[in-house]
Amino acid sequence: EVKQADWERFVNQIAMDILREQSPRKLADVRNKLYDLLAHCIPPDMIMEALVRSLLAKLNEPPLQMEVLHWGAIYEHRMIGGSKAIFHLEAFIAKVMAVYKRHLINTFGG
């Protein structure tokens, strides 16, 4: 069995945070974790890929998985063409939070 690197476990924790709570406060917490990853020279495209993979592994409904994958591709494309990766990573996370919260409300009521 191949062990995950520390930064991959950290990204996995970010994915769990996203699915546990969807709020502006949690988004700010996650932003700080993203800054930590970037400060430790983890490339933003690797962060995005690991985050999408981690989210997909935690979501068990194919339509929700497809939507996360769709937005991951869009924000990764924007990130590659942009200058500040943190903005695109954070925007992706905010989008996933909104999509997941909408899913929870539609499934369980608000």
Image: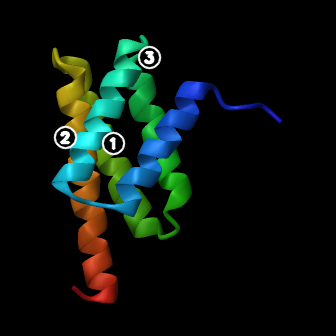
Q: Nearer the viewer, mark 3 or mark 1?
A: 3
Q: Amino acid at mark 1?
A: Gly
Q: Amino acid at mark 3?
A: Ile
Q: How far across and down, in percent of the image, does residue 86 sit? A: 23, 26
Q: Secondary structure at mark 3?
A: loop
Q: Residues within 10 Å of mark 3 (few under 14, many from 20)?
A: some
Q: Secondary structure at mark 2?
A: helix
Image quarter of residue 100:
bottom left
Q: How far across and down, in percent of the image, does residue 75 sit? A: 25, 36
Residue 51 to residue 63: above or below: above
- Residue 74 visible in the picture: no
Q: Which residue is mark 3?
A: 42
Q: Which residue is mark 2?
A: 91
- In the image, what residue occupies the spot 47% across and 67% down? 62
- Residue 69 visible in the picture: yes
Mark earlier in primary sequence (3, 1): 3
Mark earlier in primary sequence (1, 2): 1
Quadrant holding the C terminus: bottom left
Q: Which residue is mark 1?
A: 72
Mark earlier in primary sequence (3, 2): 3
- In the image, what residue occupies the spot 40% across and 61% down? 20
Q: How far across and down, in percent of the image, does residue 103 sit? A: 30, 73
Q: Residues within 10 Å of mark 1 (few under 14, many from 20)?
A: many
Q: Amino acid at mark 2?
A: Ala
Pointer 3 and pointer 2: residues touching (CB < 8 Å)?
no
Q: CA distance from mark 1 to mark 2?
A: 10 Å
Q: Nearer the viewer, mark 1 or mark 2?
A: 2
